[in-house]
Amino acid sequence: MDMDLEGPGLHVFFNIDPNELRFTLNDVLSGVAPPEAACVRLSEKMNLNGGEIYYSPASVRVAEIMRTLKTGFELDMFDNAVKRLQEKFGLHYLLIDTHPGIQHDTLLALGICDHQMIVSRIDQQDIFGTGVMIEVSSTFDKPVHLVLNMIPPRIKETEVLKFARIMGAHFTVDMAGWLPFSEEVIGSLSRTILTLKKPKHAITTRFRQIAENIEGFA
Amino acid sequence: MTTLAAFNIATVNGAGPPSFVLSSLPARIQEGAAGGVKLVVNVTNAINPSVYNFVWTVTDPAGTSKTSTNSTTSTGPSWSVFTNYPAAFGASTNLVGVYKINVTETVHSAGASVATGQFQVGLTDSASYQRTTPVLIRAIGYLPLENATVNLTQGSTSVPNFPTIKKADTNGLISLSWQTSVGTPLGTYALTISGSTTTKTPPDSQTFTVYPTNVTISGLWLNKGSIQRSQTLELRFNATYLNGSPASSGTAAIRTTEPNGTNHTITASYDSSLQTFRAFYVTTLSSTTGVWIGTIDLNSFDDGLNNGGPLIPVFTNFNVQPASLTVSAVSYNSTYSSGMIVPIYARITTPATASFTQGTVIATITSFGQKIAGPLSLVYDPSRGEWSGSYKVNATDPSGTWLISITASDGYGNTGQNSASLSVNTSGAQNPAQSLLSSWAFWLLVLALIVIGFGILMMRFRGVSHREVRLDVQAIKHQADQVKSDDFLQSIQAQLKRRAERIAAEKEKHD
């Protein structure tokens, strides 16, 4: 679910023209459309051997973005939409991709999610924001997991783990994994799902480890 | 008793005897104009309350009088009473001329006249016109479909297309128009209309006047907002007549004012290919620098047909800057040795590409920052159109590349500079800086600097890899506390709490 309502971009990965979508998450939050109508089935497109995958896009139209940001944040409506999706599609997991900052849409997702996963670079600005987010999340009493992203190649894994321990000592967060800076990911220009295109690549292995960690969430 | 009453009235109303002022709205109409003329009497210091009875008498140009009466009860000291001519008089406005009005009042003035006035009926919709305005002509009182001769003359000469025959409509109305142009002769015109059957007394005849039209100039445009001394500034404008058509003849005086207040006048004329008026102001190398003002003064435009304008002055401003002189120094191809004469030539031009002939031009010869000769004064050679000078190479002068820098200036602050290089080979020592370039010590120094630089880069690289991200826990918690107090966040939490309670209640009920 593309919950980055201010700047949605997941449709680029899935090679979907947003103008061809009949309904979006914005319509769901406005009560215009049922949530299942604002979902795109991607199972065939992703060449899945088993299971299903659906994508719930957000609107890229400025007027709809502004309308949603002004009016479309009601927890019950969003909670009901998520439950309906779960029932309609028999979902095992719903991954909600949010805006990186603390905005109304982020807090809404935080309110209804079971786990929060924060993806952060290891620079001063991102880590500060990550710390704030973890602290805010603590008020919702939900598990918070941290994935460190785009780790420069000069930094050794021991140093990453050391940093994770420092974070853990000050905040209630566990380390769900880390991803090195990858030329391949950048080079794909967000046009493909790299893990599908290069299943044996080192970065794919790391993504798989994180996915297995998620499967282990209670 | 009467005196006492008058005294009492004066006391009550407080301002002397009643006053009656007559006016007619409008003061002039065309024959048979719809609505006629509204006649109004404004009364002040009226006896209040009391009845006033007015008798209105209008005498037309033929001497026929018609009357109308109306009564009113005053409700205050000041009020007005009105009637309409011809509707309330059973009359018409079929005749051209002055209609005289006399108003009498019978209750308080014993039938004496209290106000007089007049209005005028004409054939045209105005008594005067500015060129380009159409003259609308209207006459009534003719027989249905009667032919009438319309003549328009200036002096004893009929205007082109006049006299003309016009047929009255079924109501006996004759109407036509005459379009004036920017070149219509100025002055008084006489208009007469005479029916083939109907004879009017007085006849349908009147005069009107044609005046020049105004010309509007909406703006003054420049080809450049800023020029250098010696350059020419072009100013343009468009002029339009009252009817919106563009003016395409005549001239306008444009005043240019220096920052110190000195005025110059240039003349703008029409450029038919560009369809605009253009004027040019040529600055000199001594022109005052700063912001100048260009003005088209009131009525400074004349289209050659006596039409003029503008009615309000038009302004613009532009900036005059010091001239940057272009110095083209001669290039040197050969190598000079001691005893040879190095000629120095420079062609110097102003921003207007004219030759710079008066001022100071000097040349300075250097080699790697070391002065060899100069300043050498150059003189202007009119036959070559260049500034010239020379330098004889000494045996003690250093060998190598020399730079000849030429600077031009004048007493007004206009400047320009350029340089040329030449090779010199003398028995003198090479310039120290130049010899350094060729020495092994120099290259060793460069190599050492490269090694040191590489070392610094490596140090910084390692520093980056070991730099730790600073975790300011206190600042993070402070920022988080601010977010926690956000209304929306608390609203989400409240909704979550209610939802949890609701689920718990439902579960309890189910159990």
Image: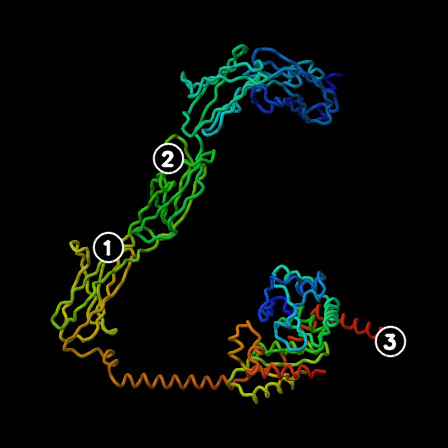
Question: Mark 3 belongs to which subunit?
Answer: B
Which chain letter goes with mark 1? B
The amino acid type, in three-letter code, at marker 3 is: Glu
Q: Quadrant of residue B309?
A: top left
Q: Is residue A51 left or right of residue B324?
A: right
Instruction: Name which residue lies at 53% across and 74% down.
Output: A188
Write down the quadrant of residue B212 in the picture: top left
Mark 1 touches mark 3? (CB < 8 Å): no
Image quadrant occupied by the N terminus of chain A = bottom right
* Residue bearing the label numbered 2: B249
Using the image, name the chain to which the residue with label 2 belongs.
Answer: B
Q: Earlier in the sequence, mark 3 or mark 2?
A: 2
Q: Amino acid at mark 2?
A: Ser
In the picture of the structure, the residue carrying the numbered disc 1 is B356
Q: CA distance from mark 2 to mark 1?
A: 38 Å
State whether residue B430 is above or below residue B38: below
Extreme bottom residue here?
Answer: A158
In the picture shown, does residue B303 fall above or below B433? above
Work out how far the residue at label 3 is from the one at label 2, CA to CA, in angstroms.
99 Å
Sequence-earlier tag: 1 or 3: 1
